[in-house]
Amino acid sequence: MGQRRWSDLTEAQRRGIAAGGAAQLALALAAAISIHGTPEDRVRGRKGAWYLACLVNWAGPLAWFAVGRRRAPQ
């Protein structure tokens, strides 16, 4: 079984890959914007590390939204 090429994929598969890539980029961008706008005292860890984590596929941005921010004091 050889490697599949882009030209071997069906139109639906190509669209699915493109949609997944666009969703991943949008999530990473949203996380980066959120990191930028979050005050240092509400960030768990260093902002630079979180920016780098956003480059790790889905896991980095999802980790930022799940555990990277401290809640605002009430």
Image (tube, rainbow, N blue to C red):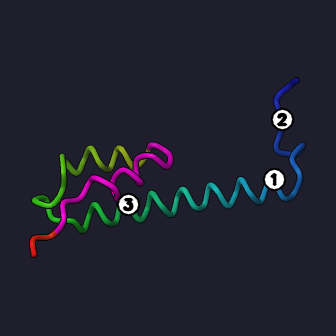
Inspect the image, locate mark 1, and give the three-letter code of the amino acid beneath it.
Answer: Gln
What separation in Å lies between label 1 and label 2 (alpha carbons)? 12 Å
Q: Specify the quadrant of the image occupied by residue 74.
A: bottom left
Mark 3 neighbour density, 10 Å: few (under 14) some (14–19) many (20 or more): many
Q: Is residue 24 left or right of residue 72?
A: right
Q: Is residue 21 magenta?
A: no
Inspect the image, locate mark 2, and give the three-letter code of the amino acid beneath it.
Answer: Arg
Q: For residue 13, which numbered disc appears in the image?
A: 1
Q: Specify the quadrant of the image occupied by residue 18.
A: bottom right
Q: Is residue 54 left or right of residue 12?
A: left
Residue for badge 2: 4
Judged from this view, the residue extending furthest toward the front is 74
In primary-sequence order, the first of circles 1 and 3 is: 1
Q: Is residue 71 above or below residue 3?
A: below
In primary-sequence order, the first of circles 2 and 3 is: 2
Q: Which residues are magenta?
A: 56-71
Mark 2 neighbour density, 10 Å: few (under 14) some (14–19) many (20 or more): few
Q: Residue at x 15, y 61 (%)?
A: 42
Q: Is residue 62 above or below residue 49?
A: below
Residue for badge 3: 31
What separation in Å lies between label 2 and label 3 (alpha carbons)? 32 Å
